[in-house]
Image (cartoon, rainbow, N blue to C red):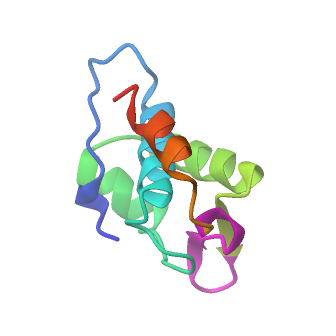
Amino acid sequence: MDATLLHIQPAAPQPIYRQIAEQIRRLVAGGQLAAGTTLPSVRDVAAAHAINPMTVSKAYSQLEAEGVLERQRGKGMAVAAGAAAPPSPQQRWDLLEPA
């Protein structure tokens, strides 16, 4: 995954860490990020979007707590195997509908 795949809107009412987390959830649910896909480092995402690295770290930590991501020693964060289970068409529609 490339850090520029995320679209961050600083002026949006939603906090940036939630924007990041929601976009990653949608990419995983939509099948664009398969299990085991490594995500860009916190520093790479922060540098690409000129945001604080702690903001990206908070989003990654939240997704790790939800089971969407898993920390891999020496490799960074990756999509968890259980998170990439194919959702039903209705679940996919529910995730895409708010967008």
Q: Is residue 82 magenta?
A: yes
Q: Give whichever of 94, 71 is nearer the camera.
A: 94
Is residue 17 among the parts visible in the rendering? no
19 left or right, relative to 10: right
Whole-percent x, y for residue 53 in the image: 47, 48
Q: Give whichever of 99, 11 is nearer the camera.
A: 99
Q: Is residue 46 above or below residue 8?
A: below
Quadrant of the image for the N terminus?
bottom left
- x 46%, y 24%: residue: 15
Q: Is residue 18 above or below residue 12?
A: below
Quadrant of the image for the C terminus?
top left
Which quadrant would residue 68 be assigned to in this image?
Answer: bottom right
Q: In the image, which residues are magenta?
A: 72-84
Q: Across the whole image, how many numbered discs are drawn on residues?
A: 0
Q: Give whichever of 41, 32 is nearer the camera.
A: 32
Q: Is residue 74 magenta?
A: yes
Q: Give whichever of 92, 55 is nearer the camera.
A: 92
Q: Residue furthest bottom?
A: 74
Q: Residue furthest front?
A: 89
